[in-house]
C-alpha cells in the first residue's frame, strides 16, 4: 500500500500559499476538533460560537461531524484499487445536519463572494442531500445524491456590523465541507490556488498521482482541409459526422463534412438523432442552440419536439478495473448550459434528438438550427426531416431488457421523506427513459436471508416492495419474463461456512440440505408470484459461473434445486464452452455475451427442446470501452435480427462506483447513463445507439408484417411484397455476421442508414396499398 | 475473474525468452511487388527458439505452407495439470525475435499460416489466440484466431497499421484457452511462414469503400486508401472512376502519400441514378479489384416513396 501524503500535501500547499498571503480571503474548514484542517484554513467545529469566535455557529448542537479521508489506494500492491473518491483535508470532513444552522463569520463590513464546498466523503446510502444556502434574501439551492461527490456553490454575502451570516437550511440533510469568503480582487488567485486544485482533485486525481497516470489518447493526424474564409472570420468551423461516429477533441473534419445540412427521416412517434460539431479557433464564452419550428406541407413540427444536449468528454479507463491509464472520450449527453465555455481548438458536439409528434402528417419538413455563441457571430444550418406514413411495430417475440439498479430499493431504505420522494421520482423518470429507448424489461432480485434453524422453510421477503416495482413496470408497459436473482450463495454459506468466491471459484458439491432449502426459497417466491398475478420469473441463482470442476458440480445441484420448485432457470454462461455441457439439461435460458451459438445451431436447439437464448452484450455498454457506439446500434438492430436470439439484456443501465462523475475513482469505472442532480437521467451516446438499433429492427419487423399482409391481399400487393422481401433478403445478406459487433468490420453508420431506408421505402409502398 | 486470469496468463514472460542462441537473420526476399522478411520458417533452428508451456513444439514435415517443414504445436487438454493455481490453463508457445528484426517500422504486414487437426470434430468459437510483445512483459496486441478450420491452412495477414504503434517488437506467442475445450481433447497446430511483408511499388493494398451503400444525392463517397510501397514524404498518383454498366458517372485523380487515409471522393452535384455501381482505383503497382457500390434513392429526393 502506498501513501499519497506527498500529493495531498501538494494540494494543501497550493491552497495554503494563497490563503495565508491574502488578507481579503477568509477560508473556513468545517469539521471536528480532531479532524484534519486544510493549510491556511480556519478550523470551524460545531462547538465554535458565532459572534465570539472568528467563525462559529449560532447553535451547533445539531451538527454532526463526518470525517472520512481517502488518501490511499485500497488493497495490496498489485491489486490496488482507487478509493471511491480522493480527499484533501478540506473535503474529507463535513458538518451535516437535518436542522437549519446559521454560521457567523467575523469580517470587516462589505460585500463578499462566497464559495462553498458541499458534500461528504463519509458513506451515506439512499440519501438525497437537499438544502439551501441563504444569505440575506439570496438563496442558493444545492442538491445531490449520496456520498463521494462534491458540489461547489457560489453566492454573495454582505457583512454588516463586522459579521457575515450564512444559513444552511436543509429539506433533508445539508453537508458542507468548507467555504471561502473573497472579494473581486482575489478571484483569480482563488481560482488558481484553491478552486482549480480542488476541482482537479475531485474530477481527476491528486497531483502526484495524476502525474503517474498516462493519457493514452487516440490522435488524428489528418491534415486540416482548407477553412472557408467566412468560417475563419466567424472564429469557428461547424462540421458534422454521423452520430454513431466517435468524435474526439481533436478529430479533423473532411472538407465535405463542413457546413452541413442536417437531415433525417423518421416515423410518427419515433426519436431520431442529429448532431453537429463546433470547432472554435479560440475559447467561446458559451453558446445557445435553437431549432426552429420545421415547416411541412400540412403543418409544422414545433421546436419543442427537439431535445438539445452537449456531449461531454470524460476521462475514461481503457478497461473497467484498469488503473494508470485513461483517455478523453465522448460519453454523456449533458443538458445545455449556455454559460459553459467552448474550449478553443477542441471539438464540441451538440446532439439533437427529435421526437416526431404522433399526429405529424407525412412529408418533408424544413427549418434551421442556429448556433449562437457569446461574443461571436451566429451560424444557421438547414434541417430537413422526412416524416414517413408508417407506424413502427414491435416484435412481440423479441425482448429488450437491461440489468438495473432500481431506485425503488433506495426509496425503501431512505430515511427521510425528501429522499424518498427523490428516489420515487428518479424511478419514474428512469422508467420513462427505459420505455422511450425501447427497453421493456429489467433484471431484479428477491433477496432473503436463509431460513433460521428453528424456522425451516420460512423466509423474510419484502414482497410489498416488489409489488411496488411490478406496479410501476406494468404502468409503464414492461413485460416479462423477469430475471430474478435469489440468494443461493447465502444458503451455500449457511451449510458450508464458505463463500463461493468470484465466479464461484471456491464452490464444491454442496450438502443435500442446501438444495432442499434453495428449492423451498424458490417455491416461496413462486407461490407469492402466482398469488399476486405477477409475470413469469426466470430464477437466477448465480452470476457467471466458471467451468471449474467444483463450480460445475455446485451449479448442477443448484439448477436441479431451482428446477425442483417448478420454475425456469437463467444462467449467464457461454453455451459454446464445452465446460458447461454438464449444465445443459438444467438451463432453460442461456444468457451469453456474444451472439453464440450461431443462428442455425441456436434455432435447431430451440426447435428440439424448450430452451431459450438471451444475450448480454457488455462489450457495447461501457464497462470495457465507452466508445463502441456504432457497434451498439448494430448489436441492437440488424445484428440482433440476424442472430436468432430472443432478448438483449446488457449490464447495466447505470453503473456508479464512488463519485459518478469521476470514472477514474472507485474499484471500477463508472459507465453508461448518468444522473442529473434532480434525478433525471442523462443519456450516453451508446444508450441512444441502443434506441437506433431498436428502431432499425422495428423497420425490419414492420416491413415483414406488411409483407405478410400484402401476400394475403394478393394482386399488386403480393407482387410488391416479393420486391420488399428481396430488399429484406438483400440487407440480410449484407450483414457481416459477428459474435460481437463492437468496432471492427461494421457497416459504416451512413451505410446502415441506407439499409434502414431501403427497408422503410418498401414498407411505405406496402402500407399505402394494404392499409 | 476469468478475464483477469487470461490476462495474467498472456502476460507470461516472452521478453526474456532468448535462452537459445538466435539463428542467423534471413535475408529480405523479393517476390514480385513484395519484399518478405522471414521471422520463422518452421526450421530446426527456428523450433529451438520456442518456449512451450503445457504443450510441445517440434518440427514437422506432415504439413508445411512454405518449404518442407513447419512448427507443430501439440496440445493435450488436461484440466487437472498445468499451473497449480490454474489447472484449466493456457497451453502456449512463445519466442523472442533477434534484435536485427525487431524494428517493424518499415514493414506493412505480419503474415503467418496455421493448419489444425484435432480429436474433436469441430473447433470451438475461439480455437487459438496470438499475442505480440513490445518492451513489456504483457502482450500489447492480442487477437483471437477465430478463422481457423479443421484440416485447412488459414493464412493471416495483419496490417501493422492496425496494431498498436509499438516498436520494436520483441516476441510473439500462440496460445489456447483450455476452458474453450473439453478435458482430453488433442490438438495439433502447424504454424509456418511467420514473416514481415512490404510492397515495393505504389500499391493500394487494403483499400476499401467505407460505405458500400449510399444515397443517390450523396455529395461524396468515402474510401479508405491504404497506399503501400511509397517512401515517406513521396507521393503517388491514384486515379478513380465510378461506373454503372460500363459508363463512368464520376472520376478523378489524387496525389497520395504513403499509409492509410480516408478520402471523400466528390460526386456529381446533380446526384447519381439509383443502381449498382463499381468503383475502380488505380495506381502504378497492384490495384484492388473494383468495389461494388449500391446507390439507393434518397429519402429527400422528389419522387421517392
Image: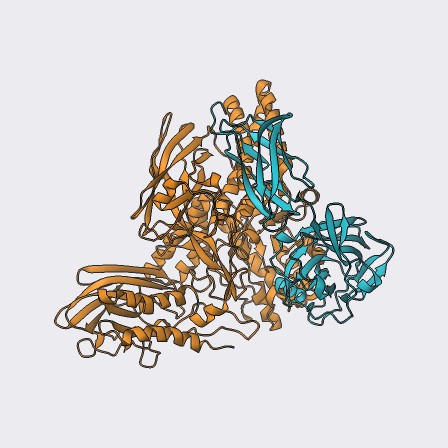
Quick one: B86 or B55, which is closer to the camera?
Answer: B55
Residue A359 lies, in percent from the top left, at 39, 31
Residue A230 lies, in percent from the top left, at 37, 40
Residue A769 lies, in percent from the top left, at 52, 21
Q: Residue furthest front?
A: B234
Residue occupying the point 29% across, 62% down: A153
Q: Is residue B95 left or right of residue B275?
A: right
Residue occupying the point 40% across, 35% down: A383
- Asked if one can make out residue A1 in the rendered structure from this viewpoint, the answer is yes
Residue A390 lies, in percent from the top left, at 48, 30
Q: Quadrant of residue A91?
A: bottom left
Q: Is residue A385 left or right of residue A174?
A: right
Q: Is residue A417 above or below residue A508?
A: above
Chain A rendering hue: orange
Quick one: A690 or A208, which is closer to the camera?
Answer: A208
Q: Residue furthest bottom?
A: A34
- Asked if one can make out residue A448 in the rendered structure from this viewpoint, the answer is no
Q: Is residue A498 left or right of residue A114?
A: right
Q: Is residue A693 left or right of residue A162?
A: right
Quick one: A653 or A758, which is closer to the camera?
Answer: A758
Q: Is residue B178 above or below residue A387?
A: below
Quick one: B107 or A135, which is closer to the camera?
Answer: B107
For the colour cyan, the matching chain is B
Disc count in the image?
Answer: 0
Q: Is residue A588 above or below residue A202?
A: above
Q: Is residue A249 above or below residue A243?
A: below
Amino acid at each position: 500500500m502506498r501513501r499519497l501524503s506527498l500529493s495531498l500535501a501538494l494540494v494543501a500547499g497550493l491552497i495554503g500559499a494563497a490563503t495565508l498571503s491574502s488578507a481579503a480571503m477568509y477560508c473556513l474548514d468545517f469539521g471536528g476538533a480532531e479532524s484534519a484542517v486544510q493549510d491556511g484554513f480556519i478550523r470551524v467545529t460545531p462547538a465554535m460560537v458565532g459572534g465570539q469566535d472568528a467563525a462559529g455557529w449560532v447553535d451547533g448542537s445539531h451538527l454532526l461531524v463526518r470525517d472520512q479521508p481517502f488518501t490511499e489506494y485500497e488493497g495490496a500492491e498489485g491489486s490496488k484499487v482507487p478509493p471511491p473518491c480522493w480527499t484533501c483535508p478540506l473535503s474529507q470532513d463535513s458538518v451535516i445536519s437535518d436542522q437549519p444552522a446559521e454560521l457567523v463569520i467575523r469580517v470587516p463590513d462589505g460585500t463578499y463572494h462566497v464559495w462553498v464546498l458541499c458534500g461528504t466523503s463519509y458513506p451515506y446510502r439512499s440519501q438525497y442531500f437537499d438544502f439551501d444556502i441563504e444569505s440575506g434574501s439570496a438563496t442558493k439551492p444545492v442538491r445531490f445524491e449520496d456520498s463521494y461527490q462534491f458540489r461547489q456553490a457560489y453566492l454573495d454575502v454582505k457583512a454588516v456590523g463586522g459579521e457575515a451570516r450564512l444559513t444552511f437550511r436543509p429539506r433533508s440533510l445539508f453537508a458542507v465541507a468548507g467555504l471561502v469568503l473573497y472579494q473581486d480582487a482575489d478571484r483569480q488567485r482563488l481560482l488558481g490556488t484553491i478552486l482549480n486544485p480542488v476541482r482537479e482533485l475531485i474530477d481527476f486525481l491528486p497531483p502526484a498521482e495524476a502525474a503517474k497516470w498516462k493519457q493514452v489518447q487516440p490522435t488524428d493526424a489528418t491534415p486540416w482541409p482548407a477553412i472557408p474564409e467566412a468560417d475563419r472570420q466567424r472564429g469557428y468551423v461547424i462540421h458534422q459526422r454521423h452520430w454513431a461516429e466517435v468524435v474526439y477533441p481533436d478529430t479533423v473534419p473532411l472538407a465535405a463534412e463542413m457546413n452541413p445540412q442536417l437531415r433525417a427521416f423518421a416515423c410518427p412517434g419515433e426519436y431520431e438523432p442529429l448532431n453537429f460539431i463546433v470547432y472554435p479557433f479560440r475559447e467561446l464564452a458559451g453558446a445557445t442552440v435553437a431549432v426552429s419550428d420545421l415547416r411541412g406541407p400540412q403543418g409544422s413540427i414545433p421546436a419543442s419536439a427537439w431535445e438539445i444536449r452537449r456531449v461531454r468528454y470524460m476521462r475514461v479507463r481503457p478497461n473497467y478495473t484498469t488503473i494508470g491509464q485513461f483517455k478523453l472520450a465522448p460519453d454523456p449527453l449533458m443538458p445545455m448550459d449556455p454559460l459553459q465555455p467552448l474550449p478553443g481548438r477542441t471539438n464540441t458536439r451538440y446532439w439533437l434528438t427529435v421526437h416526431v409528434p404522433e399526429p405529424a402528417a407525412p412529408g418533408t419538413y424544413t427549418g434551421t438550427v442556429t448556433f449562437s455563441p457569446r461574443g461571436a457571430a451566429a451560424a444557421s444550418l438547414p434541417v430537413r426531416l422526412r416524416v414517413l406514413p408508417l407506424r413502427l411495430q414491435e416484435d412481440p417475440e423479441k425482448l429488450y431488457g437491461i440489468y438495473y439498479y432500481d431506485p425503488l430499493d433506495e426509496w425503501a431504505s431512505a430515511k427521510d421523506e425528501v429522499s424518498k420522494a427523490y428516489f420515487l421520482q428518479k424511478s419514474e423518470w428512469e422508467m420513462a427513459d427505459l420505455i422511450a429507448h425501447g427497453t421493456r424489461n429489467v433484471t431484479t432480485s428477491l433477496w432473503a436471508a436463509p431460513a433460521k434453524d428453528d424456522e425451516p422453510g420460512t423466509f423474510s421477503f419484502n414482497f410489498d416492495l416488489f409489488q411496488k416495482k411490478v406496479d410501476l413496470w406494468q404502468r409503464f408497459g414492461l413485460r416479462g419474463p423477469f430475471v430474478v436473482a435469489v440468494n443461493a450463495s447465502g444458503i451455500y454459506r449457511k451449510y458450508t461456512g464458505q463463500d463461493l468466491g468470484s465466479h464461484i471459484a471456491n464452490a464444491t458439491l454442496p450438502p443435500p440440505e442446501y438444495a432442499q432449502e434453495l428449492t423451498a426459497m424458490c417455491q416461496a417466491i413462486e407461490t407469492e408470484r402466482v398469488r399476486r398475478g405477477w409475470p413469469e420469473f426466470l430464477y437466477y441463482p448465480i452470476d457467471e459461473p466458471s467451468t471449474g470442476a467444483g463450480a460445475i458440480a455446485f451449479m448442477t445441484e443448484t439448477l436441479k434445486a431451482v428446477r425442483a420448485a417448478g420454475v425456469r432457470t437463467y444462467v449467464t454462461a457461454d453455451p459454446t464452452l464445452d465446460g458447461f455441457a454438464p449444465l445443459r439439461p438444467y438451463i432453460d435460458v442461456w444468457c451469453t455475451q456474444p451472439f453464440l451459438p450461431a443462428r442455425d445451431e441456436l434455432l435447431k436447439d430451440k426447435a428440439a427442446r424448450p430452451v431459450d437464448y438471451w444475450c448480454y452484450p457488455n462489450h457495447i455498454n461501457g464497462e470495457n470501452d465507452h466508445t463502441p457506439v456504432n457497434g451498439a446500434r448494430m448489436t441492437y438492430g440488424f445484428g440482433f435480427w440476424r442472430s436468432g436470439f430472443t432478448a438483449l439484456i446488457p449490464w447495466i443501465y447505470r453503473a456508479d462506483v464512488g463519485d459518478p462523475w469521476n470514472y477514474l475513482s472507485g474499484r471500477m469505472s463508472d459507465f453508461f447513463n448518468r444522473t442529473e442532480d434532480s434525478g433525471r437521467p442523462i443519456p450516453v451516446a451508446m444508450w441512444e445507439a441502443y434506441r437506433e438499433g431498436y428502431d432499425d429492427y422495428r423497420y425490419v419487423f414492420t416491413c415483414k408484417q406488411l409483407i405478410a399482409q400484402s401476400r394475403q391481399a394478393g394482386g399488386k400487393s403480393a407482387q410488391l411484397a416479393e420486391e420488399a422481401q428481396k430488399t429484406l433478403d438483400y440487407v440480410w445478406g449484407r450483414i457481416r455476421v459477428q459474435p460481437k459487433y463492437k468496432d471492427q468490420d461494421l457497416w459504416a453508420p451512413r451505410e446502415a442508414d441506407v439499409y434502414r431506408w431501403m427497408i422503410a421505402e418498401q414498407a411505405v409502398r406496402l402500407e399505402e396499398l394494404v392499409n | 475473474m476469468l478475464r483477469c486470469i487470461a490476462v495474467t496468463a498472456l502476460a507470461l514472460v516472452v521478453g526474456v525468452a532468448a535462452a537459445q542462441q538466435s539463428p542467423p537473420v534471413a535475408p529480405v526476399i523479393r517476390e514480385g511487388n513484395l519484399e518478405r522478411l522471414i521471422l520463422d520458417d518452421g526450421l530446426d533452428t527456428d523450433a529451438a527458439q520456442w518456449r512451450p508451456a503445457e504443450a510441445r513444439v517440434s518440427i514437422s514435415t506432415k504439413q508445411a505452407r512454405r518449404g518442407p517443414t513447419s512448427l507443430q504445436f501439440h496440445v493435450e487438454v488436461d484440466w487437472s495439470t498445468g499451473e497449480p493455481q490454474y489447472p484449466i490453463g493456457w497451453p502456449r508457445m512463445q519466442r523472442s525475435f533477434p534484435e536485427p528484426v525487431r524494428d517493424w517500422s518499415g514493414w506493412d504486414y505480419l503474415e503467418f499460416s496455421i493448419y489444425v487437426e484435432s480429436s474433436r470434430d469441430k473447433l470451438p468459437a475461439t480455437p487459438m489466440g496470438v499475442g505480440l510483445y513490445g518492451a513489456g512483459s504483457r502482450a500489447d496486441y492480442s487477437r483471437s484466431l477465430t478463422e481457423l478450420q479443421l484440416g485447412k491452412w488459414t493464412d493471416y495477414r495483419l496490417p501493422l497499421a492496425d496494431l498498436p504503434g509499438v516498436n520494436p517488437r520483441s516476441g510473439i506467442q500462440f496460445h489456447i484457452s483450455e476452458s474453450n475445450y473439453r478435458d482430453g481433447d488433442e490438438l495439433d497446430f502447424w504454424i509456418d511462414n511467420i514473416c514481415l511483408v512490404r510492397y515495393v511499388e505504389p500499391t493500394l493494398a487494403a483499400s476499401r469503400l467505407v460505405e458500400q451503400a449510399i444515397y443517390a444525392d450523396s455529395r461524396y463517397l468515402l474510401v479508405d486508401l491504404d497506399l503501400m510501397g511509397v517512401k515517406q514524404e513521396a507521393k503517388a498518383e491514384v486515379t478513380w472512376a465510378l461506373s454503372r454498366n460500363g459508363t463512368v458517372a464520376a472520376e478523378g485523380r489524387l496525389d497520395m502519400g504513403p499509409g492509410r487515409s480516408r478520402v471523400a471522393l466528390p460526386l456529381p452535384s446533380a446526384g447519381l441514378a439509383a443502381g449498382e455501381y463499381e468503383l475502380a482505383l488505380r495506381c502504378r503497382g497492384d490495384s484492388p479489384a473494383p468495389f461494388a457500390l449500391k446507390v439507393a434513392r434518397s429519402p429527400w429526393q422528389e419522387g421517392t416513396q
